[in-house]
Amino acid sequence: MSKKEDPRAIRTKEMLKQAVIELLQQGIPAEKLSIQKVSQQAGLNRTTFYLHYEDIHDLLQKLTDEIVGEITKQIEELMQVRELSEKSQLIRLLDYLYNQRQHLLVLFQKNDFEEKLYEQMKRLISVRRENSVTQTPRRDIDIDIKTASLVGIMMWWLKRGLHYSSDYIATEIYEMYR
């Protein structure tokens, strides 16, 4: 049986993660973050920081892993859903990304996040293609191309195109891939 984490520890970790996100949103580059800055932003002391994380890189990695895990879970749920149309599934994913945009925009600064998102989206496209009734030619090439363009569109939308709704973006993506 796994040991439950203390609610105070969970709250403290959330405060530290939120502090990192706030500092990054203020324009402080990840490489300029310090334990002192993060602790101060969270209203905690350095000792408290060290109770939960080894260093700033550990905190950033755990934050990235947590969000990628949530996106993975969301994508896996979409792979299982059979009653929604393809466009509805895409809207659902885009709505999730929109709701998580503040965290995602911070993670876009980390090079490994885009690669992790790419791999998850490639898995989604591959599974959907395997489950499709119709086969398309040149499967090996266009999965990578479609994945790259899909991730590129999502990143552009979250960074610069939020004036477009998730429904509009899903429609445009859906039309591109028809």
Image (spheres, grey):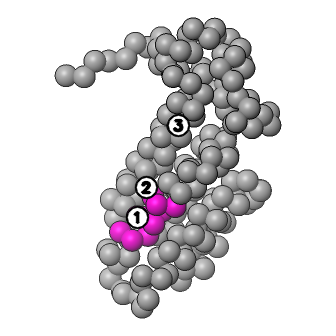
Q: Indicate the secondary structure of the residue bearing disc 2.
A: helix
Q: Residue furthest bottom?
A: 137
Depth check: give the residue in front, 38 or 173: 38
Estimate how packed mark 3 is, as few (under 14), some (14 to 19) or many (20 or more) residues with alpha carbons within 10 Å: some
Against 80, is 130 above or below? below
Against 41, is 121 above or below? below
Which kind of residue does numbered mark 3 sit on? Gln
Against 172, is 2 above or below? above
Residue highlighted by disc 1: 123
Mark in front: 1 vs 3: 3
Which kind of residue does numbered mark 1 sit on? Arg
In this rendering, does residue 167 appear at all? Answer: no
The answer to whether marks 2 and 1 mark residues whose Cβ atoms lie closer than 8 Å is yes
- The secondary structure making up most of the magenta span is helix
The part of the chain drawn in magenta is 118-127
Q: Is residue 102 left or right of residue 124?
A: right
Residue highlighted by disc 3: 61
Q: Indicate the secondary structure of the residue bearing disc 1.
A: helix
Residue highlighted by disc 2: 75
Q: Which mark is residue 140?
A: none
